[in-house]
């Protein structure tokens, strides 16, 4: 930092109480330069043993250095009910900044009537799962419809079972969930157009929806089995859902483009929303700057795995006890889309301090004991069979049909006449009719099915693939003949 102008003043906390032991240093470099610093050199120059006692914020050529006698984020309280409720601008309080101010994150943009598109990044053990649990609990308390795909087999947030409208625990069900969400957004778009509305208001007439994919890198990374469709669905939901009250969030372990479907369009779309960065690596920060999530020249203080100074001890001192690590830094991070993107913050303490043998009672209490908000009845037809059978054994049948559908897509199409055999003509003649195959599918269904689900099941029976149009034609014929009926719009079952 060449020729900086430095001023030292006591910090003024939000309660306006002077704390002389806290020191603030304002730093600036000459016009035309960008303030950059070496954290290790800065810690050494200030003769600090513990780098967690310093907070550095930069903006262009200006910087603010705050020195603390002890880490202000070491002990965090649990959230209060008031913290969890949206304010008039759609914000909830998620924790505290290092200076004691509340750290807020937007759940809904009341200024524009827009649902949020969000990202939460963090390395393993950074507190991402607890952060997700808190956000889900806040959604429930604010009567938001939560669709949650836990791609760690349900292990990331087991307490969410029964607390959200739809909980998926596999990549296959996550795709079915995303398909349903896109259809719901499109159906709302048509309804709102007919009503002459161009924006969304919570509860007028529909609830806010948030579709969250946890461990999203498993679904979107290179080599993932359903990557192409998942990326397309997330992009489409981002385009359509924002103005009709359907938001989305991706929670992942990295911010690299390849971890998010390899799509510049998707990345550009998501980084306009709420972005939370938990513990990070140096390569991740370089990626954030290069992708525009941080302004050029901005730097973030590294978040160590544990609080406390690292003490060097002689390798030959046998009297020294085994070194113990300090408290963990889980939940510490940066709200990159907030007003202070380079200011360290920490999320509230969520759940029990020590591991519990089963579901965490503190997290369950955070959710509350009311029923979760459900999708409005007007969108049930659009959500389709997958939504109707969510949380029931029938979902496994849909997943099996989906897997078969994907397998058939992956098989090369044989040329006409390929395969040989003198019995080919007889086999084709003996093949069951499409209407009979549709009838079998409906007879085996436990709940009414939409045309798309019927087609997926028909195509999973080993016969010749059929088009959606052909299935709809046969369904209409069965209804006209009285062999089937529509219990509601778009759904079919045998009479």
Image (cartoon, grey):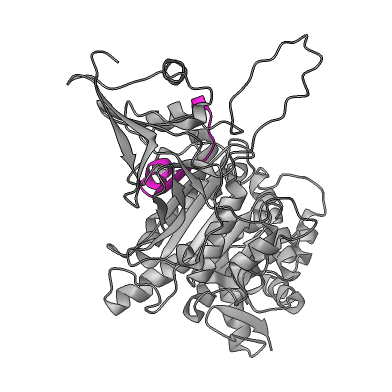
Say whether residue 275 is magenta. yes
Say whether residue 147 is magenta. no
Question: Residue extending furthest left?
Answer: 31
In the rendered view, tell whether residue 298 sits above or below residue 356: above
Question: Residue extending furthest top?
Answer: 316
Q: Is residue 89 left or right of residue 230?
A: left
Q: Quadrant of the C terminus?
A: bottom right
- Visible residue check, residue 435: yes
Give the quarter of the image for residue 311: top right
- Residue at 26% x, 28% y is 60
- Residue at 71% x, 52% y is 155
Work out whether residue 288 or residue 428 is closer to the camera in this orientation and state it.
288
In the rendered view, tell whether residue 57 sits above or below residue 350: above
Query: How far across and how far down the image is residue 120, in percent?
Result: 50, 46
Work out whether residue 199 or residue 308 is closer to the camera in this orientation and state it.
308
Q: Is residue 192 left or right of residue 171?
A: left
Query: How far across and how far down the image is residue 109, in percent?
Result: 34, 61
Give the quarter of the image for residue 149: bottom right
- Visible residue check, residue 464: no
Q: Is residue 76 left or right of residue 66?
A: right
Work out whether residue 399 or residue 53 is closer to the camera in this orientation and state it.
53
Query: How far across and how far down the image is residue 438, in percent?
Result: 69, 73
Q: What segment carries the magenta color? A: 266-283
Q: Quadrant of the N terminus?
A: top left
């Amino acid at each position: 930092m060449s020729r900086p102008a430095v001023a030292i003043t006591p910090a003024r906390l939000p309660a306006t109480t002077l704390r002389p032991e806290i020191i603030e240093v304002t730093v600036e470099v000459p016009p035309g330069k960008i303030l950059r610093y070496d954290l290790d050199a800065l810690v050494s120059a200030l003769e600090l043993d513990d780098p967690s006692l310093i907070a550095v914020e930069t903006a262009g050529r200006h910087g603010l250095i705050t020195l603390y006698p002890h880490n202000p984020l070491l002990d965090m309280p649990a959230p209060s009910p008031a913290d969890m409720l949206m304010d008039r601008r759609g914000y909830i309080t998620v924790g505290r900044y290092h200076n004691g101010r509340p750290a807020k994150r937007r759940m809904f943009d009341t200024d524009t009537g827009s649902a949020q598109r969000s990202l939460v990044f963090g390395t393993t053990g950074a507190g991402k799962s607890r952060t997700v649990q808190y956000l889900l609990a806040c959604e429930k308390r604010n009567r938001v419809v939560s669709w949650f795909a836990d791609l760690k087999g349900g292990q990331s947030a087991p307490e969410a079972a029964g607390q959200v409208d739809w909980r998926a625990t596999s990549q296959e069900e996550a795709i079915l969930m995303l398909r349903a969400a896109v259809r719901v957004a499109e159906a709302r778009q048509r309804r709102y157009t007919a009503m002459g509305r161009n924006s969304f208001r919570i509860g007028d007439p529909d609830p806010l929806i948030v579709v969250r994919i946890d461990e999203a890198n498993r679904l979107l990374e290179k080599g993932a089995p359903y990557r192409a469709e998942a990326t397309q669905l997330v992009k489409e939901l981002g385009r359509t859902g924002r103005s009709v009250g359907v938001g989305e969030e991706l929670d992942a372990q990295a911010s690299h483009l390849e971890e998010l479907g390899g799509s510049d369009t998707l990345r550009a779309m998501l980084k306009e929303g709420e972005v939370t960065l938990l513990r990070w690596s140096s390569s991740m920060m370089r990626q954030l700057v290069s992708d525009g999530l941080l302004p050029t020249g901005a730097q973030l203080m590294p978040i160590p795995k544990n609080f406390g100074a690292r003490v060097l001890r002689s390798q030959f001192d046998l009297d020294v006890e085994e070194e113990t690590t300090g408290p963990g830094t889980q939940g510490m991070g940066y709200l990159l889309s907030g007003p202070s993107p380079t200011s360290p913050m920490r999320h509230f303490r969520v759940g029990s301090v020590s591991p519990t043998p089963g579901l965490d009672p503190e997290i369950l209490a955070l959710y509350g004991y009311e029923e979760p908000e459900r999708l409005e009845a007007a969108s049930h037809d659009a959500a389709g069979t997958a939504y109707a059978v969510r949380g029931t054994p029938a979902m496994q049948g849909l997943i099996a049909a989906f897997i078969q559908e994907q397998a058939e897509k992956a098989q090369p199409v044989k040329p006409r006449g390929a395969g040989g055999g003198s019995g080919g003509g007889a086999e084709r003649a003996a093949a069951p009719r499409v209407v009979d195959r549709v009838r079998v599918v409906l007879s085996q269904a436990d709940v009414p099915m939409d045309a798309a689900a019927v087609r997926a099941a028909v195509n999973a029976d080993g016969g010749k693939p059929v088009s959606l149009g052909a299935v709809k034609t046969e369904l209409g014929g069965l209804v006209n003949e009285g062999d089937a009926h529509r219990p509601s719009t778009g759904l079919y079952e045998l009479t």
